[in-house]
Amino acid sequence: MPPQGSPASAYAAPGYGNAYQTQVIPVAQANYGNNNPAASGLGVAGSATGGQSPADSVDAVEFLPANDVERDLQDAADAGNTDVFLSTLLLANVLVPVASHSRPGSSPGESGFAFLPEEVDGERFLIVFTSRDRLSDHFGEPTRTVGVRFYDLIRNWPDQAWSFAVNPGTPVGAKYPGAQIIALANWATEAGLGAEPVDGPTAEETFSPVPAPEPASDEAQSATVMQKTISAAQVDYYLDRGYDRVAGFVHRASEVEHLRTPAELFGALGLTYEASPFQQDVKEAFVLRWPAYRPSLYRIPYGGQNEQALRAMDGWVIERPPFRGNGFAPGEGRDVIAEFKVDSVRLPHGAQLWQIDADGNERMLAIFDTDAPLWRRVGEQ
C-alpha cells in the first residue's frame, strides 16, 4: 500500500534561493487530529490573487466535485481512508502552476521547466489542483498551468525541502512534506504504477496553451537516449580497447542538451567535488550517448550519504557528497536534471562517443559496432 509517511531526512536538498517570485498565503489553523487526508489541507484563507476563506468557500457553499477524481477523493476523505485517497491521486492528472519564465512546451523534469511555488508561513509549497474549478477557487484569475500525471510530477520532484499541497482549503485537499512525496514516488515506481491509465483534468481544462504530455509507451521509453559523462582517462579504454560497458549515474540526453560547455555540464551534474576527475577549467569533456532499450535497468537512485538518510528516503543507494538521493543531479545551479543509476551494462550497437569543447562545439568521435566489436572512429571505414 502507499507509504504512510517517512521521517524527515537527515539532510535537506539545497533550495532554489530566489529562483521564483512567490506569493505569501495567509493560512488558517488546520485540524490534524485524524487520519483524513483532507484534514491536513492547507486551509487557505485567501491568496494574493484573491479568494475566500474556508468558512465562506467550503462551509457556506456545498462542495461540488468537478470530476470523477474529485468524487473519489471526497469519498476517501469522508471515509478517512488515506490509502484510497493517495491511490486515487497517484492515478490522476493534475494541473501544475507554471512560472512565467518557464520554457513553453516543457513539463516537469524537462529542460527549461520552472515551477511556481508558494510561501506559506515560511515554508515553500508546490500546490496543484485536480480540476480547473479548484484552480479558479484558489487563484481567482487566469493562471498558466500544465496538465501532467501526478505520478510524473512526484517522480520529478524538484526539491526535498519543498512541501506538497493539493486543492488547499477544500474537502479534497491534503498536504505532505517533500520527503514523503519522494517516498511515495519510490513506492509507486516499484509498484509499477507508471504505465497505468490516468483520469482527471485534460489539456483542454487548463489555462495553459501547453497540452498535457501523453503517457510514454513502452516503445517510446525504450528509445530514450541516455548520456554518461566520462573522464578523459577513460576515453582510451573505449577507443583503443573496445570497452563496451557503462555504469554509474546517467542522465537523459534531452535534459542535458542545453549544457554546451564542460563547465556547464560538470556544474549542473555536481561532478566538481573534491578529488573529482572532472574540473571546470578543462578545455574538453567526453560523453557517451546511447538508446536505452531496457528502461527497467535504469533505476532512480533514492538514498543518501549515510544509513540514516537511506532509511529516511526508503532508498537503496549510499554515495559520498554531493549525492542527494532524491532522484536529481546535485548540481550547483538552477537546473533540475533527473538522475538514474545503472549497474554495468553493455552498450548497444550505434552507441556514440562525443567530445564537447569550451566553446560549446560538439564532435562525434566514434560509433560502437557490436559486430566487430569495436569503436569505429568517425571518418574511418
Image: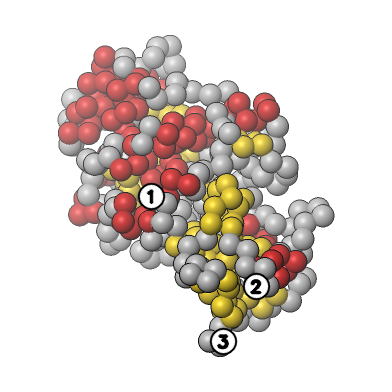
What residue lies at 66% left-to-right and 78% top-to-bottom? 357
Pinpoint residue 243: horizontal percent, then vertical percent: 63, 63
Task: Name the residue carrying label 2.
Answer: 239
80 or 10: nearer the viewer = 10
Pinpoint residue 80: horizontal percent, then vertical percent: 31, 15
Give the structural element (helix, strand or loop) at label 3: loop
Residue most extreme to the right? 275
Task: Name the residue carrying label 1.
Answer: 97
What residue lies at 59% left-to-right and 58% top-to-bottom? 245
Above or below, 331 relative to 364: above
| Residue 59 appears in view | no
How crowded is the residue under tag 1: few (<14 C-alpha within 10 Å), some, or many (20+)? many
Q: Earlier in the sequence, mark 3 or mark 1?
A: 1
Residue most extreme to the top? 33
Q: Which of label 3 and label 1 is nearer to you?
A: 3
Residue most extreme to the front? 372
Above or below, 4 relative to 213: above
Q: Earlier in the sequence, mark 3 or mark 2?
A: 2
